Image (tube, rainbow, N blue to C red):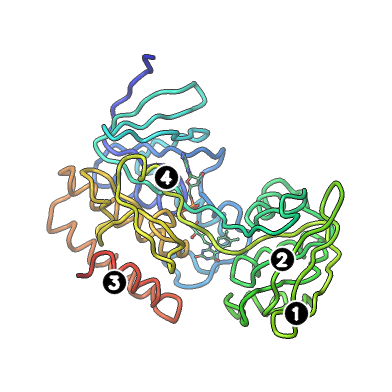
Amino acid sequence: MNLPLEHTALAVVGAGPAGLCAAVEAARSGVPVVVLDENERAGGQLFKQVHRFFGSRRHGAGKRGYEIADDLIAECLRAGVDIRLGSSVIAFFPEGELMVDGPGGVYLVRPQAVVIATGASEKTIAFPGWTLPGIMGAGAAQTLVNVHGVLPGKRVLIAGAGNVGLIVSYQLLQAGADVVGIVEASHGVSGYEVHLDRVRREGVPIYPGHRIISARGRDGLEAVVVKDLRGGRTVLFEADSLCMAVGMSPMAELAAMRGCRMVFREELGGFLPWHDEKMRAGLQGVYVAGDAAGVEEASVAMEEGRMSGISAAEEMGSMKKRQAAARRAAVSRRLADLRRGPYGEARMAAKCSLYCA
Ligand SMILES: Cc1cc2nc3c(=O)[nH]c(=O)nc-3n(C[C@H](O)[C@H](O)[C@H](O)COP(=O)(O)OP(=O)(O)OC[C@H]3O[C@@H](n4cnc5c(N)ncnc54)[C@H](O)[C@@H]3O)c2cc1C
């Protein structure tokens, strides 16, 4: 099979915050950059986020997720980045070629360097009845509501009281769903206070120490059976939708396909491609960034994206070593700031275990 072959300097897979920041950094130093994303819109997770982000102004605090995405897309376009949407990268061969399924058909790209910024996928839990219609990932529910304007159900139970569970609960409430509760297997709430307060104010009950046992229904979900882990009693929730917000895993199959070494770090979501502090994945011209390199947050994804773009530009000879070193040092400082606090420190330690020795 003879497929059309294209040459480029840097190919970035994924137009989320990590990929867009990688592209901007490299393109500004003169590297021709192509960004490939399977979605019809650029921005990754950000274009679904209608809530205001907090943190530092540099990372878009006070703006809604899709506004942060719009700013990054504008930066990319100003820097001359070629963003190709509806373009799924279906293979990354050990010889270094990418196979792309784009709007015009399948073709190959042979880049000098690749940044893999493909984000994360939602984890799930299995129990009797877990495949009933109406049971889905919280991210899928968020896409239905915020992108397509469709409620996943009228009475929704959420599994998981981390940030994603709390944010999606609030967005479902705003869209008119009745959130009947948030169940959480651990004995505390791991999401930020600010998100917890919002759902509490709306009167949503939270059930720490409760685990899902089974789901019931004929043609779709009708009820969820939950066990109180302290007392042992079971509770029945009538619900036509169950949204699972039980964590995410790095989506780095392309790195594995290329031959990168995969390592397991629980604090970062599971298996991820080994990488160093410059975001190099151990093979010439292969970089990783963002959730694909360990699940954290959009602000971290942006900084890791910048780091990978700087490293790629330097190794392709478009950025002087001294300039690259100075810019990387600034990014490292910002990453260290972002990884403060109990969760941040655990992630910092997990990252450090990859390369600090
Ligand atoms: C409900 C929810 C709320 C959140 N709220 C916040 C918040 O308030 N603050 C915060 O900092 N973070 C938040 N986050 C986390 C944040 O959205 C992510 O950490 C961030 O988007 C990760 O960026 P990324 O670029 O690594 O990946 P993503 O944003 O996931 O982008 C990855 C991109 O890669 C593309 N892609 C994947 N595979 C392929 C392929 N094979 N071919 C082509 N394209 C591909 C995808 O289409 C996607 O566009 C939230 C996440 C969720 C789910």
Task: Give the secondary structure at mark 1.
Answer: helix
Report whether the residue tagged 4 is closer than 8 Å to ligand 1. yes
Name the N-terminal-most of marks 2 and 1.
2
Chain-order first, disc 4 or disc 3: 4
Residues 109 and 130: in front is 130
Q: Amino acid at mark 1?
A: Arg
Residue at 43% in and 29% down: 100
Horizontal relation, residue 178 to residue 161: left or right: right
Check the image and name the residue furthest to the bottom: 231
Q: On the image, numbered disc 4 is attached to which residue?
A: 253
- The residue that label 1 is drawn on is 201
Which of the marked residues, 4 or 1, is nearer the chain's N terminus? 1
Provide the residue designation for mark 3: 333
What's the CA distance linking mark 2 and mark 1?
A: 17 Å
**Residue drawn at x 57%, y 51% as measured from the top left:** 47
Residue type at mark 4? Glu
Q: CA distance from mark 4 to mark 3?
A: 29 Å
Q: Secondary structure at mark 4?
A: helix
**Three-letter amino acid code at disc 2?**
Ile
Can you tell which mark lies on residue 158? Answer: 2
Give the position of the N terminus as an image quadrant.
Answer: top left
Report helix, strand or loop for mark 3: helix
Residue 334 position, x and y percent, is 33, 70
